[in-house]
Image (cartoon, rainbow, N blue to C red):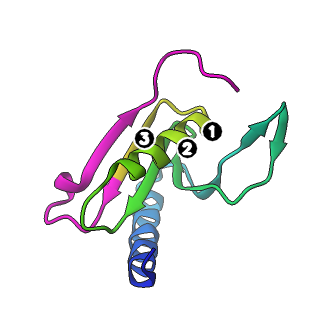
Amino acid sequence: MNLDLDLLESVYEACLGLELTQAAIAFRRQAPMPVKYRGMHLTTGFRADFLICEDLTVEIKAVDRLVPTHDAQLLTYLRMSGCQVGLLLNFNALRLKDGLRRLVRSQQTEPA
């Protein structure tokens, strides 16, 4: 990814963290996502930008537009975390609501 966009995302991440703290909402920033392989937990570099109240996964972007790869990333984090709902927040939209996407993990049983 472009370094400038990475820096921009980190600024938005820091600001959102401050807002959540001021609102007294429990969250973990850069939350590690567990990976299971053949019944073992692996240590990886997968990290969700935010895990809020251990129930909502939030991924921050600062891109021209959200693409299917962003959806796939968030859906993977939902499976890994066990969360049912996630948000993609693209701060590079004219209005934040235009850069907001809510994804829900399939209710079907998924292999561990």
**Residues rendered magenta in the picture:** 89-112
Q: Which residue is mark 2?
A: 77
Can you tell which mark lies on residue 80?
Answer: 1
Q: In this rendering, would 33 be left or right of 97?
A: right
Question: How would you rate the neighbour count of disc 2 (Cα within 10 Å): few for under 14, some for 14-19, many for 20 or more?
Answer: many
- Whether the residues at callouts 2 and 3 have beta carbons within 8 Å, the answer is yes
> Which amino acid type corresponds to the residue marked 1 in the rendered image?
Met
Quadrant showing the N terminus: bottom left
Q: Residue furthest bottom?
A: 4
Q: Which mark is first along the chain, 3 or 2? A: 2
Label ID, residue 27: none
Q: Are marks 2 and 1 in contact (CB under 8 Å)?
A: yes
Q: Which residue is mark 3?
A: 86
SS class of the residue under badge 1?
helix
* Label 3 vs 1, first from the N-terminus: 1
Q: Nearer the viewer, residue 94 or 17?
A: 94
Marks 2/1: CA–CA distance: 5 Å
Above or below, 105 against 21 in this view is above
Q: Secondary structure at mark 3?
A: strand
Residue 36 lies, in percent from the top left, at 76, 37
Q: Amino acid at mark 2?
A: Tyr
Is 92 covered by the magenta stretch?
yes
Q: CA distance from mark 2 to mark 3?
A: 9 Å
